[in-house]
Image: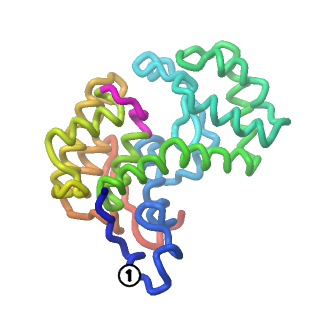
Amino acid sequence: MAAVLASPAAADPAGPATRPEGLRDPAKKEIAMRLVSAAENSSLDWTAQYGYIEYNVEHNAKENRGYTAGIIGFTSRTHDMLELVDRYAAVAPDTKLAAFLPALRKADGTPSKAGLGKPFEAAWKAAVTDPKFRDAQDRERDRVYFDPAVDRAAADGLHELGQFIYYDALVMHGDGNDRNGFGGIRKAAMKKARPPAQGGDEPTYLNAFLDARKAAMKAEQGHQDTSRVDTAQRKFVAAGNLRLDLPLDFAVYGTAYSIKAGDPK
């Protein structure tokens, strides 16, 4: 049985059920969203990314992910974009994005943009004015990436920093068990160190995980820059900031960022 992750909520006289634990605490989750946005969109303002959509030929040639869009980088090749649009169309059947579902189904698993192109991009950007579309992105982000990552990290006995490290890895690498997927990265880390739930030292395990994560990034042409590990996550581990407390000073792709308490969202 996994070790119970100690948290401030456990000491709350009102009871832990009254407060989210770990990275699910709204303030901690906001930090996680801003950290991912800095790496994915070169901006701390993650809420400005609902309407982001891009098909870059050079980027696509390296990663073959087709369109990348939205707050977490949903892609037309890796199925999450199709699921998002499908679920959104179910609650907003009049959306113009619904017309592109056949093309998205054909593109799923490929870098093709046949039947998509500029009209699809325009429909995506127009949909951002609908709160249901923004809510759909939030829900899919949590269902596919955030919640599974936090659950697994908590089961491994990891605090907020480790939960974020799992989340960021799952966003980039997907949930595959091959050596470059999240499952393969975690398996490689566990060959080098034990997680806290198995009696291991947390920083030692996190560094082993980041070593495996960096190797997986280097194996993909589109992820040769590993600064989101080297000058961000690794820096937090070295500082012993397992709770992901503010302030956080870090750099991604050579750009310095700072997240401080009281910063506007």
User: Which residue is depicted at the point 59% across and 43% down?
Assistant: 140
x and y percentages locating residue 246 in the rendered image? 36, 68
The residue lying toward the viewer, choosing from 235 and 207, is 207
Picture layout, residue 256 above or below residue 74:
below
**In the displayed structure, does residue 167 sit left or right of residue 51?**
left
Residue extending furthest toward the front: 1
x and y percentages locating residue 215 in the rendered image? 23, 31
Is the residue marked by circle 1 packed among few (<14), some (14-19), or many (20+) residues within 10 Å?
Answer: few
Q: Residue 49 magenta-drawn? A: no
Residue extending furthest toward the bottom: 13
The residue lying toward the viewer, choosing from 17 and 50, is 17
**In the displayed structure, does residue 254 sit left or right of residue 260?**
left
User: Which residue is depicted at the point 45% across and 41% down?
Assistant: 40
Picture layout, residue 226 above or below residue 146:
above
User: Which residue is depicted at the point 28% across and 40% down?
Assistant: 186
Circle 1: residue type: Ala
The residue singled out by tag 1 in the image is: 11
User: Which residue is depicted at the point 58% across and 45% down?
Assistant: 49
Which of the 4 image quarters holds residue 161?
bottom left
Which of the 4 image quarters holds residue 226?
top left
The residue lying toward the viewer, choosing from 40 and 210, is 210
Picture layout, residue 205 above or below residue 68:
below
The stretch of residues the image draws in magenta is 171-178
What secondary structure characterizes most of the magenta part? loop
Where does the C terminus fall, quadrant-wise?
bottom right
